[in-house]
């Protein structure tokens, strides 16, 4: 038995030594691949962020510098004069309209979409499938084909150039896709969690608020981001409905048209575009923390 053991040990030791020698090679290959993927991701991120940087950089330069054939990649000698020139009373008026329309539309849209997604995910009722198919069909309608009907409807109700009228149209346009998006989040939360909480003594409402609602926080935030972007950046419906009051996209368009009578001041145009984008950036900074906390706030203790 001893002789057999001594004859089998050297091959085992040789195999172990070979495995140890192969580990650094695999690790080097893995590190090289990881570095290549990281470099590729960095290049893609820089290519994506460059237009934003170019807009901010151009907003600090004069028109003469921007129209020169030599590109200026850094705002050396730049100033904030373009920002001061575009911060007029018309801007603050358009900002108030955009903020009012966006907040009202997002709040109403999330409320309706949240209730509808719970209904089609948790309950079985007649016409449920038809309702889901209708949501999908509404998304296929071209927005341009509804402009005349929307204008006549808002005119009949006296809601032209009105924040409430524009908010109604935004809710009607955004809520179908928001329902479809939230439906996936609601369907992903097991109903057994609520049933277990009800067995422990909670009512159905308490079980939903304490267990299900925190788990749906990431879905609500993601849907809110979608609704916010759609309402904040929308241009065509606001162009048809808002005759007197202007949202920020309309203000930006009017700013360019006003400058078109003479040479366009691209520095001021870029400054105005940067100012319009600042609320979106602030919103994303706030939402990022909310989304991260929402992912872990629904943890269930065993």
Image: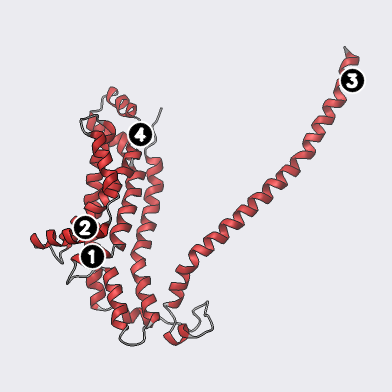
Numbered marks: total: 4
In the picture shown, does residue 159 fall above or below 187? below
Q: Is residue 267 left or right of residue 33?
A: left
Q: Nearer the viewer, residue 284 or 209?
A: 284
Q: Position of residue 60 (x, y in %)?
A: 43, 79
Q: Label 4: few (<14), some or many (≥20) within 10 Å?
A: some
Q: Label 2: few (<14), some or many (≥20) within 10 Å?
A: few
Q: Is residue 87 visible?
A: no
**How far is disc 4 from disc 2 in space, using C-alphas?**
36 Å
Q: Is residue 123 left or right of residue 71?
A: left
Which label sits on residue 238? 1
Which label sits on residue 189? 4
Q: Is residue 260 visible?
A: yes
Q: Going 24% across and 68% down the picture, which residue do you hit?
A: 247
Q: Which image quadrant: the N terminus? A: top right
**Residue at image mark 2:** 146
Label 1's element? Answer: helix
**How far is disc 1 from disc 3 in space, using C-alphas?**
86 Å
The image quadrant of residue 233 is: bottom left
**Residue at image mark 3:** 7
Label 3's element? Answer: helix
Q: Nearer the viewer, mark 1 or mark 3?
A: 1
**How far is disc 2 from disc 3 in space, using C-alphas?**
86 Å
Q: Nearer the viewer, mark 4 or mark 3?
A: 4
Label 2's element? Answer: helix
Q: Label 3: few (<14), some or many (≥20) within 10 Å?
A: few
Taking the view exactly as shown, the residue that stands out farthest to the front is 145
Q: Nearer the viewer, residue 185 or 299?
A: 185
| Badge 2 or badge 3: first in the primary sequence | 3
């Amino acid at each position: 038995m001893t002789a057999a053991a001594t004859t089998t040990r050297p091959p085992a030791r040789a195999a172990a030594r070979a495995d140890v020698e192969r580990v650094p090679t695999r690790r080097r290959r893995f590190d090289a691949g990881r570095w290549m993927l990281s470099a590729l991701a960095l290049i893609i991120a820089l290519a994506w962020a460059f237009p934003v940087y170019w807009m901010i950089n151009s907003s600090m330069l004069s028109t003469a510098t921007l129209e020169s054939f030599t590109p200026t990649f850094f705002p050396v000698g730049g100033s904030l004069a373009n920002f001061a020139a575009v911060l007029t009373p018309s801007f603050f008026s358009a900002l108030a309209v955009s903020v009012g329309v966006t907040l009202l539309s997002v709040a109403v849209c999330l409320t309706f979409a949240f209730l509808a997604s719970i209904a089609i995910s948790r309950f079985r009722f007649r016409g449920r499938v038809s309702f889901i198919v209708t949501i999908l069909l509404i998304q296929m309608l071209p927005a341009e084909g509804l402009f005349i009907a929307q204008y006549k409807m808002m005119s009949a109700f006296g809601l032209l150039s009105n924040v409430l009228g524009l908010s109604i149209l935004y809710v009607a346009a955004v809520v179908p896709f928001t329902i479809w998006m939230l439906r996936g989040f609601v369907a992903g939360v097991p109903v057994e969690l609520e049933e277990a909480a009800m067995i422990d003594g909670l009512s159905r409402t308490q079980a939903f608020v304490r267990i299900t609602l925190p788990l749906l926080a990431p879905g609500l935030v993601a849907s809110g981001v979608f609704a916010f972007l759609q309402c904040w950046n929308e241009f065509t419906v606001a162009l048809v409905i808002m005759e007197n009051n202007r949202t920020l996209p309309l203000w930006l368009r009017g700013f360019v048209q006003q400058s078109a009578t003479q040479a366009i001041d691209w520095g001021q145009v870029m400054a105005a575009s940067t100012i319009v984008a600042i609320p979106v950036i602030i919103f994303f900074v706030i939402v990022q923390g909310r989304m991260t906390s929402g992912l872990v706030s629904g943890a269930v203790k065993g």
